[in-house]
């Protein structure tokens, strides 16, 4: 009888392990060719590419709005690109989980030249954050520097649903 109690306890512990295990965040390395790769991956589909950083307070605030938007519109393609580096993966994962964004495509700048990476995305971008690229289905893009708000996200949603002509 004592052996059965131990066995049941062991089974209960083993069954509860997945509840405590945190899924590893898949962080792709973003280099000077990644933007073209993302565009190719989303051929014929709209997407929002968000560039952000751990040391950018407006970016962190923006994650809350993005998390709420993603919760309501989980079919909308959002791509998060952290301009931090790969050794900050744990901090990035913690923030993505906190805001419910850990199930979307995640990228982090590689150790390559940050200037070359920025130029590959947008020659007019000098590193200000947050930076957002709204792409419609034809990949015509609209660029917004500064923190997003719910009105901007709603306007883009209407745009990609062909209800308006712009943000």
Image: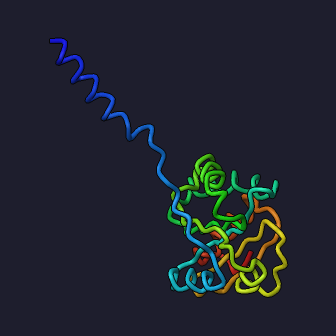
Question: Is 2 displayed left or right of 94 in the figure?
Answer: left
Which residue is at a point 82% across and 54% down the rendered structure image? Answer: 57
Residue 64, above or below 104: above
- Kindly identify the residue that appears in the image at 72 percent across and 64 percent down: 84
Question: In the image, what residue occupies the spot 79% across and 87% down?
Answer: 123
Location of residue 139 (image quadrant): bottom right
Residue at the spot x=53%, y=86% of the render? 40
Is residue 83 positioned above or below 13 on the image? Answer: below
Q: Is residue 88 above or below residue 157?
A: above
* Residue 68 x %, y %: 63, 52
Choose between 110 and 126: the one closer to the eye. Answer: 110
The image's colouring method is rainbow
In x, y percent, where is residue 81? Answer: 66, 68
Which picture quadrant has residue 134? bottom right
Q: Position of residue 17 (x, y in %)?
A: 38, 37
In the foreground, 164 or 132: 132
């Amino acid at each position: 009888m004592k052996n059965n109690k131990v066995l049941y306890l062991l089974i209960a512990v083993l069954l509860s392990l997945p509840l405590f295990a945190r899924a590893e965040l898949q962080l792709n390395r973003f280099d000077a060719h990644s933007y073209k790769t993302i565009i190719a991956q989303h051929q014929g589909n709209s997407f929002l590419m968000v560039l952000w950083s751990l040391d950018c307070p407006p970016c962190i605030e923006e994650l809350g709005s993005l998390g709420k938007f993603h919760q309501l519109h989980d079919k909308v393609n959002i791509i998060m690109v952290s301009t931090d580096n790969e050794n900050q993966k744990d901090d990035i994962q913690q923030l993505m989980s906190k805001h419910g964004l850990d199930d979307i495509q995640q990228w982090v700048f590689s150790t390559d030249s940050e200037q070359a990476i920025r130029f590959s995305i947008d020659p007019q971008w000098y590193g200000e954050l947050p930076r957002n690229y709204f792409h419609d289905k034809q990949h015509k893009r609209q660029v917004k520097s500064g923190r997003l708000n719910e009105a901007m996200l709603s306007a883009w949603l209407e745009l990609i649903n062909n209800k308006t002509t712009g943000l």
